[in-house]
Image (cartoon, rainbow, N blue to C red):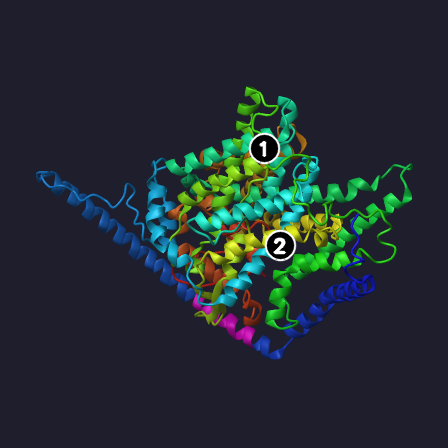
């Protein structure tokens, strides 16, 4: 067990950690006092009344205007349809002796389109599913001329360096969490060394060769769960683990490469909020279950023949884990505080997990907490650059493998493909949202091809595969943004991105910093394991916070008059909302039960994919289209309906008229919520499309 006494003065570490803990515990009380004084400020109350009157007037006028525009648009569409019919009739009377001009590509896509245009084109329902090499060719035509510019000198070197360090920190801490989870599930065959090295290798490959280098790569929670559940397959095939793992990666990589060549990446646009919300809730519930299991199970409850020192060490682990979760969750909302300066609040929120780990690690060396039995991160410090298991770095793919085992590895390989085609592409989409105003085009097909290539070094070296990170990848893009605050027509400030450093240096730099982490294993070995499980609990709670299934479940427990006046409550029969929520909860816990309590838990990505046709072909028969428009909006007809979304923006502003400009300085809190998948789709509570009108802004109160 590593001790830091030779490297840090224990007294100084303990004193600093105690002071930091006292400050953290007092912050909520100070915040409550500041909030109460702020809410009762007379000038603020007068401003609130004036703004409320403005909202009331503008809401009525704006809704009338939108309804009138809808009528005019409907008339224009009817006239256009009639004119098109007349043209078709006239064209039948003319000899067809002229040659029609050929489109620029098989799907008519212009390779020079912006990110917003290409995303809109990909998301249409008429997009062909199978197009051999068309998508990759268009991606390369669009991005290849810009490759040299990606390596040019950034406009602001400080912004790029800051984003590099930030991306490294927010990736390293979760990587350590998932490494501990993976080590338990794979009997230490895959542990911290393999996870950190994998993040470095695949990050370097992706930063150099991908079309969109702003997406950062790493190991995610779903990957840790899938590797843990598929580990038990080796016993069924009587195979050695790493040769079996080699073939899992080879099959998965081949499927990624083939699917990107034929255009299957377009499947991600078929995913609706029904599926993404279930995915997010499943991840949140799984993280909470796994963290509580690893914090409580070792307490030896009900056993009297356990050594007192061992039991004390496990209780200390539980205490440190709970404290880590509390500190992380408290600092999670630091940007909404009225304490400190804006810069300080941003640092507290951005590095909340790192701050929590540093504080709890210092406290773990207090007298009486570590009695020699406290578990810490189990690594060799300093690292000898060898695998955790007793093996060589290069895997022999046929050692201890039969033909049945080779082809049996295709099943978990296919599960990786199903998981990544959703998880990675959602990460890529979230990193290229229109609000970032990116100027360089997307490259979804080519990026998925490069993702398939990253499986090859993972197979050879025995490293866990990774994909685009959520929410780290969107947060990395945001760190590269230059932003300003603009007031909308209601006088509410909203954040607008004016410029993004679109380059490859930050993605490459954060991957190279992983080698620094490998060299600093002695420092990592000081971290108590309870802190990592506490962070896993925090991530699980964060996934629940803002998840729409969880929100609707809470509303079901409220009395009717206390429910918020959002469209899903006011425009849909409540029994319909309850039935839809019950179906989502049943699907969530079905996937959770299969993944965590059955011998075929590795098939859980297939269950998630099956939810897509269930939504399209079963739920569409149970619920009306008008109800699904509120409960599960998807498709061009529903997403781009101007008058509906603009009305919701106005209602949203009226409902949040008590939020002042100080509380809107940082409207990005939703990006810190859970896995962030809700950002991909329309949110019926507050998130409205920004493409047309620009009437409102997102407020996460």
* Dot placed on the residue nearer the N-terminal end, 2 or 1: 1
Which circle marks residue 395 in the picture?
1
Could you tell me residue 239's position as x and y percent? 63, 24
Nearest the viewer among 666 and 208 is 208
Above/below status of 513 relative to 694: above
Instruction: Find disc 2 in the rendering and name its residue.
Output: 516
| 309 lies left or right of 249 | right
Could you tell me residue 294's position as x and y percent? 74, 42
The dominant secondary structure in magenta is: helix
Disc 2 to disc 1, how far (Cα)? Answer: 25 Å
Label 2: few (<14), some (14–19) or many (≥20) C-alpha neighbours in 10 Å = few
CB within 8 Å, label 2 to label 1:
no
Q: Is residue 72 magenta?
A: no
- Judging from the image, what secondary structure is the residue with disc 1 in? loop
Q: Is residue 284 visible?
A: yes
- Judging from the image, what secondary structure is the residue with disc 2 in? helix
The residue drawn where x is 55% and y is 74% is 49
The residue drawn where x is 41% and y is 38% is 260
Q: Is residue 54 magenta?
A: yes
Q: Is residue 274 visible?
A: no
Could you tell me residue 519's position as x and y percent? 65, 52
Q: In which quarter of the view is residue 604 placed?
A: top right
The residue drawn where x is 58% and y is 42% is 578
Magenta segment: 47-59
Could you tell me residue 533's position as x and y percent? 71, 47
Q: In which quarter of the view is residue 400 placed?
A: top right
Above/below status of 260 relative to 434: above
Label 1: few (<14), some (14–19) or many (≥20) C-alpha neighbours in 10 Å = some
Report the number of discs: 2
């Amino acid at each position: 067990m590593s001790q830091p006494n030779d490297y840090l003065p224990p007294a100084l570490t303990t004193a600093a950690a105690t002071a930091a803990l006292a400050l953290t515990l007092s912050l909520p009380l100070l915040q409550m006092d500041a909030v109460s004084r702020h809410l009762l400020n007379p000038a603020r109350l007068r401003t609130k009344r004036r703004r409320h009157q403005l909202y009331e007037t503008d809401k009525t006028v704006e809704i009338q205007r939108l309804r009138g525009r809808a009528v005019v648009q409907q008339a224009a569409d009817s006239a256009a349809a009639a004119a098109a019919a007349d043209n078709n009739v006239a064209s039948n009377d003319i000899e067809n002796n002229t040659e029609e001009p050929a489109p620029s590509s098989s799907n008519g896509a212009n390779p020079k389109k912006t990110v917003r245009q290409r995303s809109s084109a990909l998301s249409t329902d008429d997009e062909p599913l199978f197009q051999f090499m068309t998508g990759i060719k268009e991606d390369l035509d669009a991005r290849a001329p810009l490759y040299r510019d990606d390596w040019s000198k950034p406009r602001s070197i400080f912004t790029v360096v800051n984003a590099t360090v930030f991306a490294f920190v927010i990736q390293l801490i979760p990587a350590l969490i998932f490494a501990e989870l993976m080590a338990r599930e794979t009997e230490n065959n895959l542990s911290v060394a393999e996870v950190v090295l994998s993040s470095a290798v695949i990050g370097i490959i992706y930063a150099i060769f991908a079309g969109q280098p702003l997406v950062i790569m790493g190991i995610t929670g779903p990957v840790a769960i899938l590797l843990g559940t598929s580990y038990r397959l080796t016993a069924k095939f009587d195979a050695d683990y790493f040769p079996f793992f080699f073939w899992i990666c080879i099959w998965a990589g081949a499927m990624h490469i083939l699917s990107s060549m034929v255009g299957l990446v377009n499947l991600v646009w078929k995913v609706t909020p029904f599926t993404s919300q279930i995915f997010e809730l499943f991840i949140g519930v799984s993280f909470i279950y796994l963290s509580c299991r690893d914090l409580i199970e070792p307490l030896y409850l009900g056993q009297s023949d356990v050594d007192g020192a061992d039991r004390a060490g496990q209780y200390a682990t539980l205490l440190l884990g709970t404290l880590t979760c509390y500190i992380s969750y408290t600092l999670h909302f630091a940007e909404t505080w009225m304490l400190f300066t804006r810069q300080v609040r941003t640092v507290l929120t951005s590095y909340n997990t790192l701050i929590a780990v540093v504080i709890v690690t210092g406290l773990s060396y207090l007298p009486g907490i570590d009695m020699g039995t406290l578990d810490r991160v189990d690594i060799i410090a300093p690292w000898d650059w060898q695998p955790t298991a007793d093996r060589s770095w290069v895997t022999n793919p046929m050692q201890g493998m039969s033909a049945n085992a080779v082809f049996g590895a295709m099943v978990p390989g296919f599960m990786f493909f199903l998981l990544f085609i959703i998880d990675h592409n959602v990460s890529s989409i979230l990193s290229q949202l229109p609000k970032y105003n990116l100027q360089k085009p997307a490259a979804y097909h080519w990026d998925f091809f490069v993702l398939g290539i990253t499986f090859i070094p993972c197979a050879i070296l025995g490293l866990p595969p990774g994909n685009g990170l959520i929410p780290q990848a969107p947060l990395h893009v945001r760190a590269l943004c230059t932003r300003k605050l603009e007031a909308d027509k209601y006088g509410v400030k909203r954040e607008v991105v004016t410029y993004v450093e679109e380059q490859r240096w930050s993605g490459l730099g954060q991957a190279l910093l992983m080698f620094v982490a490998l060299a600093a294993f002695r420092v990592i070995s000081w971290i108590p394991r309870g802190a990592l499980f506490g962070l896993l609990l925090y991530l699980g709670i964060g996934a629940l916070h803002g998840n729409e299934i969880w929100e609707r479940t809470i509303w079901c427990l409220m009395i009717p008059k206390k429910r918020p006046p959002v469209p899903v409550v006011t425009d849909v029969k409540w029994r319909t909302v309850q039935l839809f929520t019950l179906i989502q909860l049943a699907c969530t816990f079905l996937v959770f039960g299969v993944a965590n309590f059955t011998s075929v838990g590795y098939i859980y990505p297939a269950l998630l994919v099956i939810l897509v046709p269930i939504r399209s072909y079963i739920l569409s028969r149970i619920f009306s289209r008008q109800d699904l428009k509120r409960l599960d909006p998807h498709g061009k007809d529903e997403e781009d309906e101007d008058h509906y979304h603009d009305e919701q923006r106005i209602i949203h502003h009226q409902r949040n008229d008590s939020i002042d400009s100080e509380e809107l300085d940082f409207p990005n809190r939703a990006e810190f919520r859970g896995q962030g998948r809700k950002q991909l789709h329309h949110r019926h509570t507050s998130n409205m499309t920004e493409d047309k009108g620009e009437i409102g802004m997102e407020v996460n109160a």
